[in-house]
Image: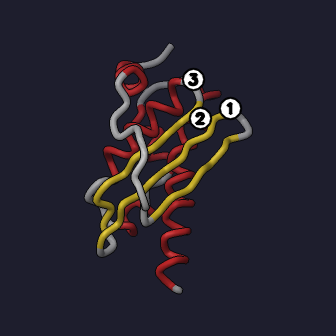
Amino acid sequence: MYNKKIIENFVNPKNAGKITKPEGRADYSDDTCHNTVKVFLRIKKGIITDAKFKASGGPVTIASSSVLMQMIINKTVEEVKNISYEFLLVEMGAMPPEKFDCALTGLKATYEAIKKYERKQKK
């Protein structure tokens, strides 16, 4: 049912955990698949230097959050804001269409963490 990338990142998620006093942090719950992802971002001079997540949910939510956190480290905030839903779905590989929303939960949490970070920077 799930491809090798999803299985590997579900069984051995990378960057799972928490960052103390992150510059960006957000929780996002998806009502469709009933999953929640918390994202913690360390941002220095506009570059994401560390990214961690905590997820409660199924294999696709956990795996896609793992893949995403690996992808965004050492990227600028602007680069991460430009990651599209479609790009992440392609990056994750084949999965049942009913799991697409689950795969995007971490990305939506990341977008929210960046919005909160940018609001703090304006103050």
First reached walking from the N terminus: tag 3 or tag 2: 3
- Residues under numbered marks 1 and 2 in contact, where contact means CB atoms less than 8 Å apart: yes
Residue at (33% x, 61% y) in the render: 48
Instruction: List x then y, in percent, for residue 67.
Output: 37, 38
The local crowd at label 2, few if under 14, some if 14 to 19, many if 20 or more residues have their Cα within 10 Å, is many
In this figure, which residue is indicated by the disc labeled 1?
Answer: 33
Which residue occupies the extreme top position in the image?
1
The kind of secondary structure element at disc 3 is: loop
The kind of secondary structure element at disc 1 is: loop
Residue at (33% x, 35% y) in the render: 14
In this figure, which residue is indicated by the disc labeled 3?
Answer: 96
Q: Mark 2 belongs to which amino acid? A: Cys
Which residue occupies the extreme left position in the image?
74
Which residue occupies the extreme front position in the image?
20
Q: CA distance from mark 1 to mark 2?
A: 6 Å
Q: Of tags 3 and 2, which is closer to the observer?
A: 2
Q: Is residue 6 above or below residue 90?
A: above
Q: CA distance from mark 3 to mark 1?
A: 13 Å
The local crowd at label 3, few if under 14, some if 14 to 19, many if 20 or more residues have their Cα within 10 Å, is few
First reached walking from the N terminus: tag 1 or tag 2: 1
Instruction: List x then y, in percent, for residue 116.
Output: 55, 68
- In this orientation, which residue lies closer to the viewer: 97 or 43? 43
Instruction: List x then y, in percent, for residue 38.
Output: 54, 47
Q: Point out which mark residue 102 bears.
A: 2
| Residue 9, picture quadrant | top left
Q: Mark 1 belongs to which amino acid? A: Cys
Q: Mark 3 belongs to which amino acid? A: Pro
In this rendering, position of residue 63 left or right of residue 100:
left
| Residue 78, picture quadrant | bottom left
